[in-house]
Image (cartoon, rainbow, N blue to C red):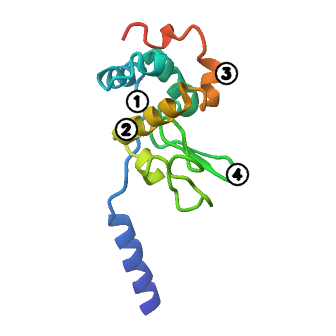
């Protein structure tokens, strides 16, 4: 009986802990946030490039996680744990953005944007993102049309 009561108390405590809430951005909503935060023309790319990238990397979902086997991609920009953030699971992470990967999973994308800009700056563009190569190298204006 004591064991059941103890387990019940633990479960109750876990359920009461605050949890990060993810968000799915609308296309134009994300475009506005990116415009307001200096993404237009950043490293020679349009805001539309970034919106396209986010759509194809995460479906505009801030809580998206993709397991690559030895590393994981996190958040709306799918930032990789091998190089850019620390998830406590990826051996030898460089954590170049000096941040926990879990910070990329909530509805506040300020830290995601800061790290994504660092990645783009160090790479000289959006080349680190596979989705940008596949889907976003041309005809991206439609991603912000009407916004």
Secondary structure category for the residue under label 3: helix
- Distance, label 2 to label 3, CA atoms, is 24 Å
Q: Is residue 55 left or right of residue 133?
A: left
Q: Is residue 118 left or right of residue 89?
A: left
Q: Earlier in the sequence, mark 2 or mark 3?
A: 2
Secondary structure category for the residue under label 1: loop
Q: Earlier in the sequence, mark 1 or mark 2?
A: 1
Q: Which residue occupies the foreground of this view, 43 or 22?
A: 43
Q: Earlier in the sequence, mark 3 or mark 4?
A: 4
Of all residues shown, which one is farthest toward the bottom? 2
Q: Nearer the viewer, mark 1 or mark 3?
A: 3
Q: Quadrant of residue 42?
A: top left
Q: Check the image and report above or below for 35 versus 81.
A: above
Q: How many callouts does the rendering have?
A: 4
x%, y% of residue 27? 43, 21
Q: Earlier in the sequence, mark 4 or mark 2?
A: 4
The residue that label 4 is drawn on is: 69
| Classed neighbour count for the residue bearing mark 4: other residues with Cα under 10 Å, few (<14), some (14–19), many (≥20) | few
| Classed neighbour count for the residue bearing mark 3: other residues with Cα under 10 Å, few (<14), some (14–19), many (≥20) | few
Q: Nearer the viewer, mark 1 or mark 2?
A: 2
Secondary structure category for the residue under label 4: loop
Please identify the quadrant where the C terminus is shown.
Answer: top left
The residue that label 1 is drawn on is: 25
The residue that label 2 is drawn on is: 109
Q: Residue at x 44, y 39 (%)?
A: 115
Q: Quadrant of residue 118?
A: top left
Find out whether the residues at labels 1 and 2 contact each other: C-beta distance under 8 Å: yes
Please identify the quadrant where the N terminus is shown.
Answer: bottom left
Q: Residue at x 52, y 57 (%)?
A: 87
The residue that label 3 is drawn on is: 134
């Amino acid at each position: 009986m004591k064991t059941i009561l103890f387990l019940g108390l633990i479960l109750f405590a876990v359920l009461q802990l605050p949890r990060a809430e993810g968000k799915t951005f609308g296309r134009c909503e994300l475009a506005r946030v990116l415009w307001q935060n200096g993404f237009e023309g950043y490293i020679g790319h349009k805001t539309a490039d970034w919106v396209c990238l986010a759509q194809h990397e995460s479906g505009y979902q801030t809580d998206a996680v993709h397991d690559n086997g030895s590393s994981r991609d996190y958040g709306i920009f799918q930032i990789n744990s091998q190089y850019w953030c620390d998830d406590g699971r990826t051996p030898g992470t460089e954590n170049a953005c000096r941040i926990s990967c879990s910070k990329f999973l909530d509805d506040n994308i300020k830290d995601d944007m800061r790290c994504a800009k660092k990645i783009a700056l160090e790479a000289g563009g959006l080349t680190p993102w596979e989705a940008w190569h596949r889907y976003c190298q041309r005809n991206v204006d439609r991603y912000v049309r009407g916004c």
